[in-house]
Image (tube, rainbow, N blue to C red):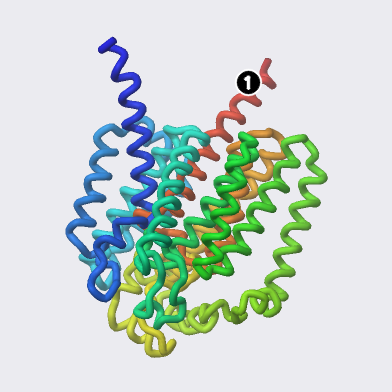
Amino acid sequence: MKMNQPKAFYPLVSYSFHVFLLIMFSGAFFPLLVQDQDGVSASESGFLYTIVFLGIYISYLVNFNLNLLIKAILENSLLFGLIVLVSFSFLYSEISVVASKRCLMFFLSSLIALNLGQKLNLLYFLNCSKVALLLITITSLFVIFFLGDIGKMDDTQNMGMHLGAWKGVFIHKNKFGKIMALQALLHGFLYLVYRKRRHLLLILISIICIYFSDSTSAILIALASLAFMFVCTVSLKGENVKLIGLIVLTLSLLLFVFIEVDYIFGLFGKEADLTGRIPLWIILWDFILEKPLLGYGFENFWTNESISHEVWTQMNWNNIYQAHNGFVDVIISAGFLGFVWLIWIILKTFFSAILWLSKHPDLTFLWTASFFFFFIFYNMIESSTIKHNDAFWLFFVVTVSLHNKVKKQKYIHENIAILH
């Protein structure tokens, strides 16, 4: 009996660790607990933040398999090259101490994600994610309904523009909306796999949470991504012509949404400038042109007080710490070199997933295509691309790693079949 206990115990520990890892990378709970008296998160500059994530890195690296990591790097050489480029950007950063710390965190968290993609299968990873996001959702709803204003935006945040918007166990309503959008996509996928109605219920709960977080764009993108995912399921029946036609139709509808942006956002009482994002991007363009090739270094631009205050002054809006566009922030951090590199990875992986999905009804290719569709459009309104200790970047790296692993397996199987 005692000999059998470790077999049951260690998988439970491993599963629990992955759930904890996803919760921490989501930005839930912890930043809210260590915010200062003004309601501003002091987590990333704090000693406790460093210790917690150092513990996560050590816990994972203690048991990591070097051969598996090398295999993951070789299979994802293009992605690993981008990770290295960003990780060493502290060498030309003006704030080298802060930049080097964050670059190291980015490198280690990216290695963990690469290893996860090589070590785990898709459904195991998504089921861990499902549990983590469900815990976040349940706790957020409890905080919102039973702990007063803790779970809602107050008048000290964003100059009171989003007063009362739901933020749950996050420091900002955008983070809550982003994670709920990811949860909607995840349960849309799991519904296609298991056909359980509870997944539809969780999609509905996620959309409601996004709505009350005052994240209009997130609702549109979540719904469009779910539509795209269901479109892609046509290929599982081998109907490739219909797949192509439906993809074109979906993209056309999205184009219509962006063309008629004034009308669409007017329905939600919003302005077509995406709540000040477009004026911000115009201002940032001048800064980008000062360092176009390699940018300002990883997360160095917004931590440079002289630069950030200049942006605030031009925007007449304090406490802006991101471009609210993932691709703009990539150009700022890694220049046009990093931007082109990232776009190359995105387009290569996305169209590879569509191509392989048309030939092989594999769930990994369906997830890759759906997540990348979601990732591309979400990063047009929020900065969720190259980040350290971030759930979106974790999902991105794991998805690329899983895709390349399964694609290689299919390719080898096809060649063996031809030889026989």
Which residue is nearer to you in this view: 88 or 46?
A: 46
Residue type at mark 1: give it: Ile
Residue 168, quarter of the rendered image: bottom left
Q: With 4 as the anchor, is 364 left or right in this view?
A: right
Which residue is nearer to you in this view: 164 or 347?
A: 164
- Image coordinates for residue 195, horizontal then vertical, percent: 65, 36
- Image coordinates for residue 371, horizontal then vertical, percent: 57, 50
Residue 11, quarter of the rendered image: top left
Mark 1, secondary structure of its residue: helix
Judged from this view, the residue extending furthest toward the left is 47
**Tag count in the figure?**
1
- Image coordinates for residue 52, horizontal then vertical, percent: 23, 50
Q: With 188 as the anchor, is 213 left or right in this view?
A: left
Q: Residue at x 63, y 40 (%)?
A: 197
Q: Which residue is drawn at 31% across and 48% down?
A: 108
Residue 17, quarter of the rendered image: top left
Q: In which quarter of the image is the C terminus?
A: top right
Which residue is nearer to you in this view: 230 or 111?
A: 230
Judged from this view, the residue extending furthest toward the top is 1
Q: Residue at x 42, y 61 (%)?
A: 145
Q: With 186 as the anchor, is 35 left or right in this view?
A: left
Q: In this view, does 149 lie above or below 309?
A: above
What residue is pinned by disc 1? 416
Mark 1 neighbour density, 10 Å: few (under 14) some (14–19) many (20 or more): few
- Image coordinates for residue 408, horizontal then vertical, percent: 56, 33
Which residue is nearer to you in this view: 416 or 402?
A: 402
